[in-house]
Amino acid sequence: MSDLVLTVTCPTRRGIVAAISGFLAANGCNITDSAQFDDLESGRFFMRISFRDTDDHGIEALRAGFAPVAESFEMEAAIHDATRPMRVLLMVSSFGHCLNDILYRWRIGALPIEIVGVVSNHLTYQKLVVNHDIPFHHIKVTKDTKPEAEARLMDVIKETGAELVVLARYMQILSDRLCREMSGRIINIHHSFLPSFKGANPYKQAYERGVKLIGATAHYVTADLDEGPIIEQDTVRVTHAQSPADYVSLGRDVEAQVLARAIHAHIHHRVFLNSNRTVVFPASPGSYASERMG
């Protein structure tokens, strides 16, 4: 008996849910969780179903069997093995709080992923990564070597079979070509002061302006810098009594938490692209433990 996830995106019309549930029932599958959203503005329908293949048809047979249903409703549909960890490539520069947080969550099973490598333009975290028995790839980036560096990055992505790339405070801008090629498969994290406080020392700028809320945003990477579809956000309150260093510390904490939640949603196929936005289905209370531990 296999635990599987069906994801569906298609133009909205009558009969979609009936067709999907009818197919699953006819093939001896038991639905364990279901979420759907009909976007009246875009005319798109989104659905995620967790189910068990109780008759052991096998994922390939179910994919082939569902193809006519998908075609009849013009669906972008996929059936995923919920027990297989997604292959994830991490990228980091000089700030290690997000990397450390991901490694910890991965180690205790809170992020059931397969980390296939870590790429960095610095050597700062080489020992940390190697001590976790994870391949470390040092790809130095300068203005003159940027095309070669990005070509090497693409080689690493292909060689490792990475399904998701996570920019865990990787501070180099990716090319438009790479963003297009990896559309919906690169997640970035940054503070939520943009566009107000650009450039260096954003937390110091926020302190000097008396900001009362510090936030972070995780989003898919697009050619428009820091403007991709948002997956997850959060804030933490600060007061006049706190220092710029406090702002930085609190900001790092919220960045790490938001990035982890975005990764968690993506690897469990709960995020759907909806033009410049996303549809993110929450983990149901009954399914969270199994999602968390794989």
Image: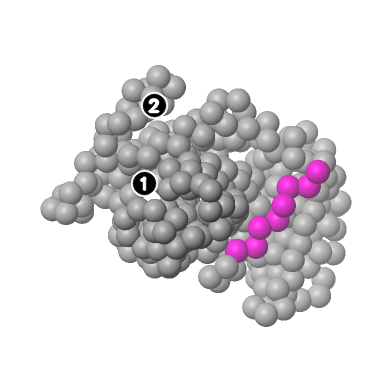
Query: What secondary structure predominates along the stretch shown in magenta?
Result: loop
| In-image side of 140 versus 111 (left or right) | left
Q: Quadrant of residue 158?
A: top left
Q: Nearer the viewer, residue 46 or 29?
A: 46
User: Residue 170's mark?
Assistant: 1
Q: Which residue is mark 2?
A: 129
Task: Report the amino acid beneath label 2.
Answer: Val
Residue positioned 33% across, 63% down in the render: 176
Q: Position of residue 71 (x, y in %)?
A: 66, 67
Closer to the chain start, of discs 1 and 2, is: 2
In the picture, the quarter occupied by the C terminus is: top right
Task: Report the amino acid beneath label 1.
Answer: Tyr
Q: Is residue 245 above or below residue 42?
A: above
Q: Position of residue 182 (x, y in %)?
A: 42, 56
Q: Which residues are magenta?
A: 278-285
Q: Is residue 219 one of those drawn in magenta?
A: no
Crowd tier of the residue under label 2, counting other residues whose Cα lies within 10 Å: few below 14, some 14–19, many 20 or above = some
Q: Position of residue 141 (x, y in %)?
A: 21, 46
Residue positioned 55% across, 61% down in the render: 230
